[in-house]
Image (cartoon, grey):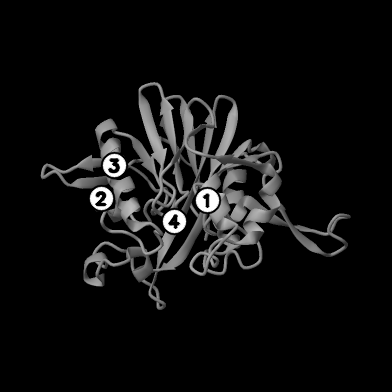
Amino acid sequence: MSIPSGAKFKVGAVDLTVVNDGMFWQDAGAVFGLVPRVMWERVAPPMDERYRIPLGLNCLLLRSRGKTVLIETGIGGKPGDRDVATLADDGTLLTSLAAIGVAPADIDVVVNTHLHFDHCGWNTSVEVGGASAGEGAERFVPTFPNATYVINRTEWDEANHANERTRATYLSRNLDPIADRLELIDGEHAITDELIFVPAPGHTAGHSTVVIRSGQEWGVYLGDMAQHQVQLERPPWISSFDTLPLVSLETKRKLMDECIEAGALVAYTHGAYPGVGRMTRTPEGFRKWVDEPPLDGSR
């Protein structure tokens, strides 16, 4: 089996390609938090024998003002990374990039919306042998050797001072090797004049999004603002993984209404591939997600 990848979209003059790291399985009750199962099981994909549902690992490759930018790096390929994910033999972020002619060295900027293990796993890879590691030894190195890693400063600080709740998802093997390549951001930050890194707290205190503005069009990559589209349609449906649930509610409600008003293209990590759509309103006034078809020739 091979994973689908390479779906193409466009916001103004900015080209977007969804590069897939496969999918991983997460406890269904945890995804939907306090929402009763009798409600969420109507919309959730089928569970496996361990009561888990599949979640996408949709990363986004953008080209803007001469820069090649990768948003999110999936779950990774180091020992243990894919224990809860699809097999590397089925395809990963790196094979998805290779399929469109992009090598790790081609990436200029890596953006992590936050640093949970399923969003920054390919920040680093295993280097085997070599003079620095010792014959046959392994060490973790940055996967994208020429990239600057853009991360919110609060997120970086919390990831490196994890508590009892967060230490299982903030993994040093994804963080330590990139410590000398960081651009830590306070507030908003222009990656280019078309790509703006914007705080969007709630899932974590330092969680951020990427807003894409080009011409009269705009879009947004939501990161982990939702794990299922129904959480965008119904902001009070809050994941148990959101560390600031009431902040998450306000962030989602405000941003989704802005996306509806502007007709923005919306992408997020954990939707069913490719995880791209637009928020609309029904005649009754309810928020409604509508899948956006990829441009002709992409899948």
Answer yes or no: do the residues labelled 4 and 1 have beta carbons within 8 Å?
Answer: no
Q: Earlier in the sequence, mark 1 or mark 3?
A: 1
Query: Mark on residue 155?
Result: 1
Eye-nearest disc, 2 or 4: 2
Eye-nearest disc, 2 or 1: 1
Query: Mark on residue 254?
Result: 3
Q: Relative to 148, is 203 above or below?
A: below
Q: Residue at x 54, y 59 (%)?
A: 117
Residue type, numbered disc 2: Glu
Q: Relative to 111, is 90 above or below?
A: below
Q: Position of residue 159 (x, y in %)?
A: 56, 57
Q: Residue at x 52, y 54 (%)?
A: 119
Q: Relative to 188, is 123 above or below?
A: below
In front of the other: 5 or 158: 158
Residue type, numbered disc 3: Lys
Residue type, numbered disc 4: Gly
Eye-nearest disc, 2 or 3: 3
* Separation of residues labelled 2 and 3 (CA atoms): 12 Å
Which residue is identified by label 4? 56
Residue type, numbered disc 1: Glu
Q: Is residue 155 left or right of residue 95?
A: left
Which quadrant would residue 78 be assigned to in this image?
A: bottom right
Which quadrant would residue 37 be assigned to in this image?
A: bottom left
